[in-house]
Image (spheres, rainbow, N blue to C red):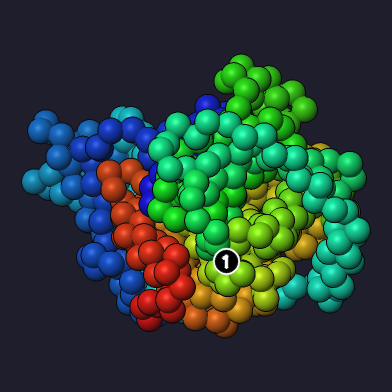
Amino acid sequence: MKKNFPPFPSRCLPVLASLIAATLCHAQPMVVAPDKTNGVYQVGDTVHWTVEWEGGTNPPAARYLLKSGGLTKVGQGDLTFSNDMATVDSQFDKPNTMLLEVDWLTNPVWGGAVAAPDKIFPAAPPPDDFDTFWEAKLEELEKIPANAQLEKVDSGKPGVAYWKITLDNINGTHIEGQLARPATGAKFPALLILQYAGVYKLQKSWVTDRAKDGWLALDIEAHDIPIDQPDSYYKEESAGPLKNYWNIGNDDRDKSYYLRMYLSCVQAMKYLKSRPDWNGKTLVVMGQSQGGQQTLMLAGLCPNDVTAALALVPAASDMLAPEVSRASGFPNWYFNTAGKDPKKVHEASRYYDPVNFARHIKCPVLIALGLHDEQLAPPSSILADANEITSSKEVIILANSGHQNVHGSQEPFFRRADIWLSVLREGKPVPVMQ
């Protein structure tokens, strides 16, 4: 499964490098853990945190910071070690998450906990005209034929056929992607793969591996750019027209950069359903981070078209969470107003927030959050998503994970995703674990 939830590369998103550098480093000799290994508590419980030094020398000077909901500071101070061990206590007074950050000589380390995870809800309801806004956008898209342009390319994998593909999208834009399927056979289940944040090329294996397993797999760029240029091309795009793309038009719901991105997912899904080699039954959508964001959006915007949705650490959720003293997900539009009218940015963000799509989802959903995820996809924001979903769902709380699969921290999700995809490929019911 990991091959289709690729790691979030710092080279693709330099502005976030400082946020994820710590999670990409080698094993830290400073270890933070709550007293419950699963990190799950009840309201009123006290979390007894341990901070252990495993460096083989005397512990260095270290400070701790406790943040409720990933945002509000509720405690801080110096750590006092005895026999290489220090302790910190915190108490939950309501359903929420808690993040313990320890700063020392090198990168910070984190521990996470949550109380009453099924009782954390979105900070605000959707806009009154949320549904009519998106109905109008879907009507606009309906007038644009996909006009698929396919270029067959060697897949590099025996038994797999592979194409580069271009589809038409709104406002004269295009959708660039890659398509693969078994070289023989007539009908296949469909899999739509949506991409994490950044500006980068697509890896052929992301679809060919799935096609080898029997899928009709389509993977699309989040941007209107070629999928296979030299790395220098993507660096130039990232530093030029796509620099901080997440802020483009973020103060106007009709001009948001995410409008084209979201509708590209719909057009790609419609194209898959139109293909004569689709089996007419199974269409699964999946993605990580920004890809998870798009996954929940698509499952909610087109609830009758998606068979199952798999979202790993979905971003951009619960955008108004700071109003209830919780952190929102990247791109953090609540604070990231970039010199614009904050009220307009906040209002526009509501139309792109996965929590407002989640309430319409009808299919089974596999969703995962990392209790250490500090700013990219805070656990409280993902629980706000999950608790709006009324269809069958499986929520995986990754107690020892941040935004990345560091040292196998996201393996519980990958194992379940493999099982889900296996049964979905065979047309069987999803084995949701409550």
Is any atom of residue 76 visible in this view?
no
Residue 372, image x, y percentages: 40, 53
Q: Secondary structure at mark 1?
A: strand
- As drawn, 230 above or below 143: above
- Could you tell me which residue is drawn at 74 percent across and 51 percent down? 264
Point 36% across, 56% down: residue: 414
Quadrant of the frame with the C terminus: bottom left
Q: Say which of 173 and 161 sits in front.
A: 161
Question: Measured along the vertical axis of the image, is residue 55 above or below residue 329?
Answer: above
> Which residue does the image show at 90% across and 45% down from the upper left?
171
Horizontal side of residue 45 vs 138, given as left or right: left
Residue 190 percent coordinates (x, y): 56, 60
Where does the image place residue 116, in percent across and percent down from the top left? 42, 78
Residue 248: quadrant of the picture: top right
Q: Is residue 82 left or right of residue 158?
A: left
From the viewer's perspective, is residue 234 above or below residue 418? Answer: above
Count of numbered circles on the image: 1
Task: Identify the residue position indicated by label 1 in the image.
Answer: 279
Q: Name the residue: 64% across, 44% down.
A: 220
425 sits left or right of 303 in the view:
left
213 is higher (above) or lower (below) than 107: below
Closer to the camera in the image, 270 or 417 = 270
The spot of residue 204 in percent (x, y) is 51, 36
**Callout 1: few (<14), some (14-19), or many (20+) C-alpha neighbours within 10 Å?**
some
Residue 281 in sight from this viewpoint = yes
User: In the displayed structure, does residue 36 sit left or right of residue 325?
Assistant: left
Q: Nearer the viewer, residue 111 or 46?
A: 111
Q: Quadrant of residue 242?
A: top right
Name the residue type under label 1: Asn
